[in-house]
Amino acid sequence: MKRKLFALVLCLVTAAFLFTSAGADEADQVMTFSLQQAVDYALENSAAIKLANTAVEKAEVGYKEAKNAYDKAKGAGDLPREERMMMSSEMRFESHKLAEGYYKEMADMGRTLAKAGREQAIETVKMAVQNAYFNLLFAKEKAEIQKSVLESAEKDMDIANKKYELGMVSQVDVLSSEAALESARLGYNTALRDLEYQEMSFNKTLGLPLKTRVNLTDGLTHEEPPEADLEERVTLALQNRYEVIAAKEQYRVNELNHKLTLGWYPENTYVTRQARYDMEKSHHQLVSTEQDVELSVRKAYMDMHSAYESINVLGKNVERLQKAYDIARLRYDNGMATSQEVVNALNALNDIKLQHLKAIHGYNLARLQFEASSGIGIAAAGGMAAAAGSAAGGAAASPAGGF
């Protein structure tokens, strides 16, 4: 019995060891991604896109049922007088709307929005991955800058200590160098923590375990903005953007509802006025949406060019402040400047390097925004695509079984 128990314990320990080793090997594995590879990986594994595909399938079923109900109502003709007498005015009107294709058109709107929502889901995943990729690159570059600042501060600290031992500088110079070193160490540690967070955020975006180690092969770019006909981009956006498609579909359905209502009820009744109000409101929203979309394209274009211009200006400032720091160190080495002057020059150089890096990072993001602005667009979190698809799908499905 004891031997069996010992053998069982040994098996369990061995299995646990193998499992732990496998987990450790998996954690140590480094996954390499170019930007396109990261996008492809996320698109293949995205739950949001799978959900959007399900929404399209649901909308297709809703349209099929609504069309069958429409065909049935159209083929049946007018209801017998006895049945009409037993129905309320509202029920007769709903039957009329069914026979005139109103609910079929609503279902068609739901199908259109579901398909557009799927395209938007794809673009949203792409944008999320690209943003996460560039954010991680930015964090890596920032950590490198902070590391170089720390190394410079350590060298300055060594020089200050040696000069102090030789009686060439006062204790104030040593204290100033110590403060600069502590500040540089804090900046580097903070940058490392941010790098760790951005890597986990990138992994989450791709659907990887948070602790997965990744290697990125692409870098931040500051090549010239793409040549683009802005007016053509605006025209494309007014054709492609989800917001415009949704607003047009809503106006189309509300216009049909107003037409049918006006043909059934007198013009001065509440229900007719409500239908007219809904139509006019949706038209106003369409016009406003088109203006918002045009404005967003123009703003994205301006932001992209402003970000690119700032890169060049800040790049020249980096060169100037690098020279200023080199001069300050040379003067300090020759006893012509204090350690505080060196610290100030180092801090100024560090600040402008970070500003330059932020400008490059911002330009990459702004360029993505501009490229996306003339397509289907990006969904807001929990935004209109899901809500409109759900509402349209529900509205499309109900009359098929109800009338």
Image: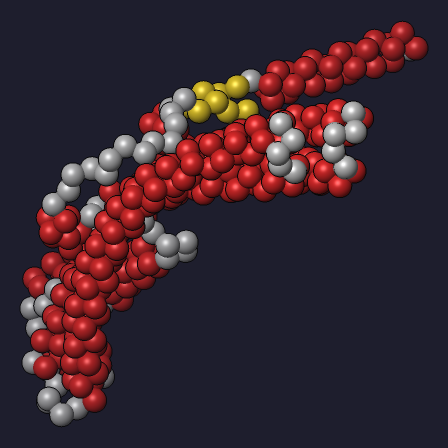
User: Left or right of 339: which side holds 266?
Assistant: left
Q: In this view of the protein, which residue sits in the foreground, 350 or 240?
A: 350
Q: How is the image coloured?
A: secondary structure
Q: Nearest the camera: 362 or 275?
A: 362
Is residue 316 something one can see in this rendering? yes
Q: Quadrant of residue 7?
A: top right
Instruction: Give the vertical position of 19 relative to 146 (above or below).
Output: above
At x 27%, y 32%, the residue is: 223
Residue 22, above or below 315: above
Horizontal and vertical percent for residue 249?
Answer: 18, 61
Residue sitting at x 71%, y 25%: 158
* Residue 382, position as x, y percentages in the image: 41, 55
Residue lying farthest bottom? 268
* x and y, in percent, of residue 90 in the image: 22, 81
The answer to whether one can see residue 244 in this image is no
Q: Going 42% across and 36% down the picture, which residue do you hit?
A: 320
Frontmost residue, 70 versus 82: 70
Q: Is residue 340 above or below residue 255?
A: above
Rendered residue at 34%/51% (across/down)? 379
**Relative to 134, residue 114 above or below:** below
User: Which quadrant would residue 286 be assigned to in this image?
Assistant: bottom left
Q: Position of residue 400 (x, y in %)?
A: 23, 61
Relative to residue 243, is residue 28 drawn left or right?
right
Which quadrant, please, contains the C terminus?
bottom left
Numbered marks: total = 0
Q: Quadrant of the N terminus?
A: top right
